[in-house]
Amino acid sequence: MMKPKESHDKKHALFRPGADSKLHFFEKSIYIIMYHIPIHKIHLLTVRISRLFTGKVKEYTVFVICMLCMVLFMGSAADKITDHDTFQKGLARVPFISSYAPVIAWAVPALEAAVAILLIVPPTSRWGLFGFTGLMIIFTVYILSMMLLAEKLPCNCNLLLSKMSWGGHLLFNAGFTGLALFALSISKMNIHFKENEHEQLR
């Protein structure tokens, strides 16, 4: 009946730094981990490292989406400002906003530029995503109205988007709106994770 105890004692003695002067650093590290750090703390450390890695992946994903949205809006704003007359004349041809065309022609690129700046600054990137989503929804409503009421009017969009059909614009806007909403959802999850992490560390 005493044999298991003896073998257990020998197993413990094997990892005692004082029992064998020839123990390597790695073996001493194993001893410290096995007999001086509680198992639940090792598990908690592993979970935190895993969650931290996941959190970093989320941060990088949000960053990439913010950069894509920023490039889209900054390019759009620059194009509308450099070719302002054409943009304003195009708006003036839309019946239900023609009287507001001069104001809208400056307000839209100004808002796009402001949102783009919010997107590239980390502390305000979440607000930038909200602004981007809101403007994209407004643009989508505008496109739907064009499809229903003024299908033959030319598009006042920039770059390669000017070659798209109204249906193509609708899909493009829906895709970027979905990306922005996805970034908002995972950034919210990341904020909750960081808050819980701070509470656990107290």
Image (tube, grey):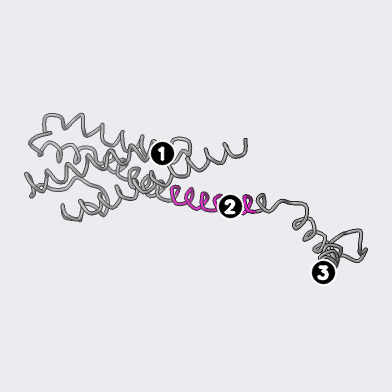
User: CA gap, disc 1 to disc 3?
Assistant: 66 Å
Region rendered in magenta = 43-63
Question: Does residue 11 appear left or right of residue 128 in this picture?
Answer: right
Q: Indicate which disc, 1 or 2, sits on the residue closer to the N terminus.
A: 2
Residue 47, label in figure:
2
Residue 37 image position (x, y, % from top left)? 74, 51
**Which image quarter: residue 141?**
top left
Task: Report the side of 180 relative to 197 (left or right).
Answer: left
Horizontal side, residue 130 vs residue 124: left or right: left
Q: Which residue is mark 3?
A: 1
Residue at 15% x, 29% y: name it. 100
User: Going by the picture, which residue comes out furthest to the front?
Assistant: 1
**Relative depth, front residue between 89 and 180:** 180
- Estimate the x, y position of residue 52 in percent, counting from the top left: 56, 49
Q: Residue at x 12, y 36 (%)?
A: 92
The residue carrying mark 1 is: 126
Residue at the image point whose x is 91% and y is 66% from the top? 22
Q: How far is the residue under mark 3 from the one under mark 2?
A: 40 Å
Q: Residue 197, labelled with which disc?
A: none
